[in-house]
Amino acid sequence: AQQTRKEVVTMADWLRANFGPTLCELFFEPFHELYTAGLFREIAPQDAYKTPVNLSLVIRGAFDDVPPVGYNATFVYPEKGLNVLAQRMAKRCQIQYGKRVVKIDVENHELFFEDGTGARYETLISTLPLNQALEMTGLEVGEPADPYTSVLVLNIGAKRGPKCPSEHWVYVPRSKAGFHRVGFYSNVDVSFLPKNARERNDRVSIYVERAYPGGQRPNDTGMDEYCQTAIAELQNWGWIGEVEVADATWIEAAYTWSKPGSRWRQKAFKVLEEHDIYPVGRYARWVFQGIADSVRDGLLAGSAFISNNKPEK
């Protein structure tokens, strides 16, 4: 009898349906266990465009080279870096730094800042993570928020190890320390190295990502222990040698997910927009997208805001 194809409900289902048990056991399941902090068995499939599955290319790739595929096979990048692009955009804006919003009064259209000051608004364009925007407004949508994962990013400057990869980043399905990705800044561009090390090519600058269930930040001791364990593991692999600088950064809302059948995201948009708050960008829209898409969304939102506020002739 022909085996019935299992219904695809979760990301785990989608991985099995598209890659089969062998590849899932070897890579996809252990990797997603780390990458989603264990959520892949209960969240809906998403971002399928990032993993184009083409059986003919898979077969061809077993014997020959295949063309690059995926959402980032080609991309544009500012010649002088994203920081310069952001700085030049900022010069054309009125920005108040050090103003952390802690509460949004939707009835009186007022923002309250951590420093005790406030500001009135007519229309608000929000790039806050969607769950935080709801929390600050006190608005409810009648169902639990979709999950997210936090990420601890360990940035390292070190002597290049004898087995240091040449790739821009590497996905890691198994690590004792628990990290799932290692990226190599200096493989992208030598400007990520100190000037006196750029010609010798004996140094490397990297980032190491480890995911945690949303909001479960380790204490300082736990963070220090993890960093030392991760460094020792990378040294044992031969990817890095002596570490010259290391610094960890916590990203509270790093990757956003959705539960199968959830309407939380759409309901959140609706209730916020009913109160003149418009979510824009990756975290506010609770969707994966690249930097270029986020810049585009910001420019479009700004243009729409300006157009709607032009005086009538």
Image (tube, rainbow, N blue to C red):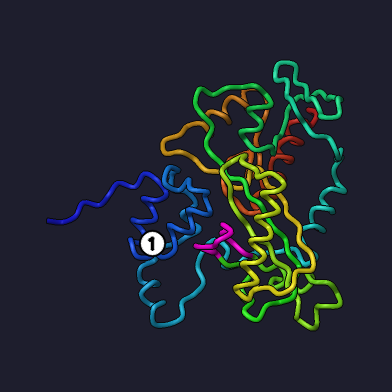
Residue at the top extreme of this rendering: 107
Q: Position of residue 215 (x, y in %)?
A: 62, 39
Is 5 on the left-hand or right-hand side of 158? left
Q: Quadrant of the N terminus?
A: bottom left
Name the residue rendered at 40%, 51% in the picture: 12
Q: Quadrant of the C terminus?
A: top right
The answer to whether residue 174 is magenta is yes
Name the residue rendered at 51%, 22% in the picture: 142
Q: Is residue 46 above or below residue 64?
A: above
Q: Is residue 244 above or below residue 33?
A: below
The answer to whether residue 105 is magenta is no
Name the residue rendered at 45%, 58% in the picture: 30
Name the residue rendered at 55%, 64% in the picture: 171
Quarter-wise, where is residue 169 in the image?
bottom right
Q: Main secondary structure of the magenta part?
A: loop
Q: Position of residue 83 (x, y in %)?
A: 80, 57
Q: Is residue 10 above or below residue 239?
A: above
Query: Dot 1 surroundings within 10 Å: few (below 14), some, or many (20 or more)?
Result: some
Quarter-wise, where is residue 172 in the image?
bottom right
Q: Is residue 152 above or below residue 107?
A: below
Q: Secondary structure at mark 1?
A: helix
Q: Which residue is at the front of the view, 57 or 193?
A: 193
Q: Which residue is at the front of the view, 148 or 53?
A: 148
Q: Position of residue 285 (x, y in %)?
A: 60, 40
Is 271 on the left-hand or right-hand side of 38? right
Amino acid type at circle 1 is Glu
Which stretch appears magenta? 171-182
Quarter-wise, where is residue 225 in the image?
bottom right
Q: Which residue is at the front of the view, 157 or 74?
A: 157
Q: Position of residue 264 (x, y in %)?
A: 51, 31
What is the number of callouts on the image?
1
Identify the residue position indicated by label 1 in the image: 25
